[in-house]
Image (cartoon, rainbow, N blue to C red):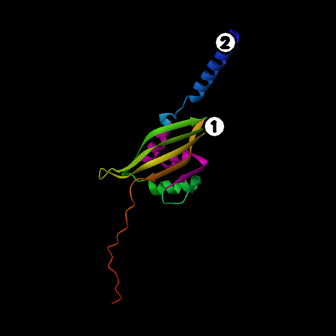
Amino acid sequence: MKAHMKVTGAIFGLLFLALAGCARQETLPRSVMEAYEQAFNKNDIAACLALFTDDAQILPERGPIVSGHAAIERYLKDQMTPIALYDTDDDMTLVRRDVAVEQGLYRVRNLKRGVDIEEGKYIRIWRNTNGAWKLYRLIYNTDLEPRADVSVAEENSGQ
């Protein structure tokens, strides 16, 4: 009976160690998470594009999916401006083998006026490709209501 208890105790001990190893959560290196933000703020399209996988997609709010390097390059050229600062604050990262998820909050600040012009939430899905973490999906959505366009042109009343 004592031998049976020792074996059972050993099995439970090994099971505990195995589960403890599985529960260990890895995170993305800070340099990986900050690379996109830094390149974007330098208006460095080439550095931004180098961070994306060949089959990457950006899923912007209120817009179509942006797929592949050529479309992402056009999209980034439209989004980048030297008067805006893009800032992120991650609140969760999770790494499993060659896939990682990063989630957090972002804001866009107008540097000339010194005010935030957009803020919201984002998720970045990274894939480890040939030893380097690359952006596979970028999803973001704003917390701010869209502004209505206002026209100051006079109406033609038909007179």
Tell which circle, 1 or 2, labels the residue nearer the N-terminal end: 2
Spot occupied by residue 13 in the image (x, y as percentages of width and height): 62, 18
> Which residue is at 51% across, 37% downward?
93
- Above or below residue 41? Residue 6 is above
Q: Secondary structure at mark 1?
A: loop
Residue type at the position of mark 1: Asn
Depth check, front residue: 72 or 92: 92
Q: Could you say which quadrant of the image residue 20 lies in?
A: top right
Spot occupied by residue 97 in the image (x, y as percentages of width and height): 62, 35
Spot occupied by residue 146 in the image (x, y as percentages of width and height): 40, 61
Q: For the residues marked 1 and 2, what is the alpha-carbon distance in whole angstroms?
A: 45 Å
Disc ID at residue 130: 1
Depth check, front residue: 5 or 122: 5
Q: Is residue 147 visible?
A: yes
Disc ID at residue 39: none
Disc ID at residue 6: 2
What are the residue bounds of the magenta stretch? Answer: 32-60
Q: Is residue 42 visible?
A: no
> Which residue is at 56% across, 42% downward?
126
